[in-house]
Structures are given as structure tokens and as C-alpha cells.
Image (tube, rainbow, N blue to C red):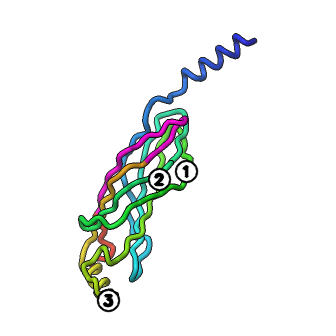
Amino acid sequence: MKKLLFLFLIITITSCTLTQEPEFIKLDNYKIITFNKNEVKLGTSAYFINPNDVGVELVSTDIDVFVNELNVSKVNQVNSINLTSGNEFTIPLSVNIPTNKIVKDKGGIFNGVLTTLFNKNIKVEYKGIVTLKKAGIKFDIDIEGEEILTEFKK
């Protein structure tokens, strides 16, 4: 009986894929979630594939956000999320950006901010690292993506 249990355990362990790092595919679904005179909240989804038989856990993110080539904020998401094994998964990312970092209008005049945003496209770039944990092992995965948001363009 012990030999049978040991054999079953060996077969189970060797048939599971544990050695491959989850792979970053793309950033997609860029959107402006909210906009007011003080801040713009942006969102995107990071797509990954996990080729392993074991799920992964999102440990943290450290992603710089650039708007029109200016570094305006960071996505520091430390909420632990359990993600499934053996398939594609997405991680939602969001960031709050003070409007005074996006536009040159430092006077705080809301109309000036609106005029600037309504007359320009917004180029948003994300560059950084997502840390995932699988079977107790942490993986830092580089991610990068950009999109031109035209929602405010007249």
C-alpha cells in the first residue's frame, strides 16, 4: 500500500508543470474611468498566460505611468489576487493621476484643464514590473504598453 501511494505521488508530481514562468502578453482595454478637476483615473488590463498546472498569486505591481511622455504616477497595487492555472488571465490595473501633472496650466483653472484635454489626444504608457508568486517562488515579470486615448478629442 505504501509503495502504491508513493508511486501515485511521484506520478502526480512529475506530471504537473511547475517550471515555466507566467508570460506577459499585452496591455489592453485602456480607458478613462473618471475625470474631474483634480484627477483623472485611468484603467487597463494586463494579460498573462500561465502554462503551469498550479495557479499563481499577484503579489504586487511597480509600474510607472507616463502621460504625453511625462512620468505622472505609479501603479502600486498590493492587493493579493489568486489567478487560475493553465490558461490566460487578466489583472486589472488602475491609477489616479492629478490633472496638474497632465497639463501645463498650473493656475488651477478648471476651464484651462478642460480646454487642454479636449483639444489633445492623451498618450498613456505603462512600464514596470508585476510580481507573481507560484508554489512559493516569486517571479518579476516586465510589462510595457501604450495607447493613445482620444475620448477627450473633439
Amino acid on which the number 2 mark rests in the picture: Ile
The front one of 118 and 19 is: 19
Q: Which residue is mark 1?
A: 81
Q: Which residue is mark 2?
A: 91
Q: Residue at x 38, y 71 (%)?
A: 97
In front: mark 3 or mark 2? 3
Amino acid on which the number 1 mark rests in the picture: Ile
Q: Residue at x 47, y 57 (%)?
A: 77
Is 53 left or right of 68, judged from the image as shown?
right
In front: mark 2 or mark 1? 1
Disc marking residue 24: none
Q: Is the residue under label 1 in contact with that under label 2 (CB below 8 Å)? A: yes
Instruction: Rate crowding at label 3 as few (under 14), some (14 to 19) or many (20 or more) other CA atoms within 10 Å.
Output: few
Range of residues picked out in magenta: 131-147
Q: Secondary structure at mark 3?
A: loop
Q: Secondary structure at mark 2?
A: strand
Magenta region, mostly helix, strand or loop?
strand
Q: Secondary structure at mark 1?
A: strand
Residue 81 is situated, as x and y percent measured from the top left of the image, at 55, 50
Instruction: Say above or below: 130 vs 120.
Output: above
Query: From mark 3 to mark 2, how far is it between C-alphas?
Result: 35 Å
- Residue 137 counted in the magenta span: yes
Q: Which residue is mark 3?
A: 109
Residue 122 is situated, as x and y percent measured from the top left of the image, at 28, 70
